[in-house]
Image (spheres, rainbow, N blue to C red):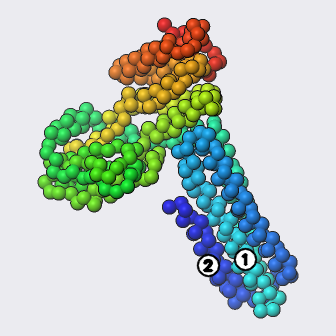
């Protein structure tokens, strides 16, 4: 509801413009500032007209810049940047300054009194200073559109959602293996309710697992959410199964636990940050842009996220109640899902780039070290490294370039660390 933020500022400006001058003239009827009405009118007129022009120019440039950079990186970034609350707060302050200054002009020399409400006009100057501050924040925010800052912001979002989504699985008192065994038993129970989606295509943005646990506990059931966060729902898609319930659970309450949006969000979607980073990387590798260094910078963030995931217990889609009984199941990505999402498309489109292949090899080697405590994950990484080697051998690079591409290099083309084999 960020679009309502400017309306709050505008409403406040209207209310202040209607009430503050009346209160001031009622209790302080004289012009304590010694200001001349003509000077005050000229000042307020310059402020109001200047703020309106500044608002139009700044936000036209800002949205054009956002659109241009988002198309250059990924179309899914446009809404993310444009819906930043900082933009709407700045717009609200700018318009509020313009509206309030107009109101004050109507109170200068009102009824031929020759008075200038000093306090009310001082508020205009305070709003002008506040507008300057928000203007500075807005310009500073545009620096986030630089590729390095954009990649870092996406990586930060991804790291934050990993901490949130896997914090419960990391808790020492939670016996994950027991929950997985309970889940196998729960899937054998009869389905007492099947909840389906009805409506236009929408994407699952968030699950209210706390509410689902409460409902499942009251019904003595296990609620199995079939669709994952990030899935796009079509009409009549199966959303969840209620298994083994003593009494039916109200369908509207179950549907209310699933928040839908027009596109994927970061909120509970650990894969979304990786998706955006991969989008930026493969767009940089397209023939139209041909910028492998940007792809290497994207791999820097991807590697960091995967190293963190390598130390996490990924079986986090099972939630028990206070007594330890399994109540909610929902799908979560596996280690192989994360790995293929992160590297498959970059490997495919970057096969002809020596720089990208060297950086990919370095990333896979680093992640393998981070996953050394889990032999299953390490084996998947080693198999993926062989797949990378096979892609290099089939590429159109000549023999010498294939040899160079098979070396590890954290910079892509910087310092060779280790040669394949």
Find residue 120 and report its horizontal and vertical position in percent. 72, 78
Looking at the picture, does residue 275 appear above or below residue 28?
above
Which residue is at 28% across, 59% downward?
253
The residue lying at 53 percent from left, 60 percent from top is 2
Residue 208, visible in the rendered structure = no
As helix, strand or loop, the secondary structure at mark 1 comes to helix
Residue with the mark numbered 2: 15
* Disc 1 target residue: 102
Left or right of 328 in this view: 80: right
Give the vertical position of 354 relative to 13 (above or below): above
Left or right: residue 183 versus residue 290 is left
Looking at this view, is 55 or 16 the one in front? 55
Residue 113 to residue 38: above or below? below
Q: Report how far apart the C-alphas of labels 2 and 1 lie in the structure.
A: 13 Å
Residue 15 at least partly seen: yes
Location of residue 116 (image quadrant): bottom right
Residue 359, quarter of the rendered image: top right
N-term mark: 2 or 1: 2
């Amino acid at each position: 509801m960020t679009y309502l933020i400017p309306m709050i500022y505008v409403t406040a400006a209207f209310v202040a413009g209607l009430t503050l001058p009346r209160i001031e003239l009622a209790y302080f009827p004289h012009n304590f500032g010694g200001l001349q009405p003509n000077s005050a009118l000229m000042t307020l007129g310059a402020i109001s007209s200047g703020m309106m022009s500044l608002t139009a120019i700044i936000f036209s440039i800002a949205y054009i810049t956002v659109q241009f950079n988002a198309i250059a990186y990924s179309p899914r970034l446009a809404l993310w940047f444009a819906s930043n609350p900082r933009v709407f707060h700045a717009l609200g302050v700018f318009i509020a300054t313009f509206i309030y200054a107009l109101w004050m002009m109507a109170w200068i020399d009102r009824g031929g009194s020759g008075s200038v409400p000093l306090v009310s006009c001082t508020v205009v100057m305070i709003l002008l200073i506040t507008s300057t501050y928000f203007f500075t924040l807005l310009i500073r925010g545009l620096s986030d559109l630089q590729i390095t800052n954009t990649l870092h912001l996406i990586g930060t979002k991804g790291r934050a959602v990993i901490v949130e989504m896997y914090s419960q699985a990391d808790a020492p008192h939670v016996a994950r293996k027991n929950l997985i065994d309970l889940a196998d038993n729960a899937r054998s129970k009869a389905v007492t309710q099947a909840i389906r989606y009805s409506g236009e295509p929408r994407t699952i943005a968030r699950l209210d697992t706390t509410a689902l646990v409460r409902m499942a506990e009251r019904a003595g059931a296990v609620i199995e959410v079939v669709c994952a966060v990030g899935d796009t729902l079509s009409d009549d898609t199966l959303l969840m199964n209620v298994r083994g319930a003593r009494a039916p659970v109200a369908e509207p309450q179950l549907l209310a636990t699933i928040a839908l949006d027009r596109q994927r969000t970061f909120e509970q979607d650990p894969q979304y940050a990786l998706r955006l980073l991969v989008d930026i990387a493969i767009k940089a590798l397209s023939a139209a842009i041909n910028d492998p260094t940007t792809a290497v910078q994207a791999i820097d963030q991807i590697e960091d996220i995967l190293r963190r995931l390598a130390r996490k217990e990924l079986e986090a889609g099972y939630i028990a109640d206070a007594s330890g009984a399994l109540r909610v199941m929902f799908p979560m990505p596996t280690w192989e899902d994360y790995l293929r999402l992160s590297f498959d498309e970059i490997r495919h489109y970057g096969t002809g780039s020596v720089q990208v292949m060297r950086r990919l090899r370095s990333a896979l080697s680093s992640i393998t070290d981070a996953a050394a405590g889990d032999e299953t994950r390490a084996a998947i990484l080693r198999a993926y490294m062989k797949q990378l080697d096979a892609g290099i051998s089939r590429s159109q690079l000549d023999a010498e370039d294939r040899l160079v591409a098979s070396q590890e290099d954290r910079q892509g083309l910087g310092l060779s660390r280790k040669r394949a084999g």
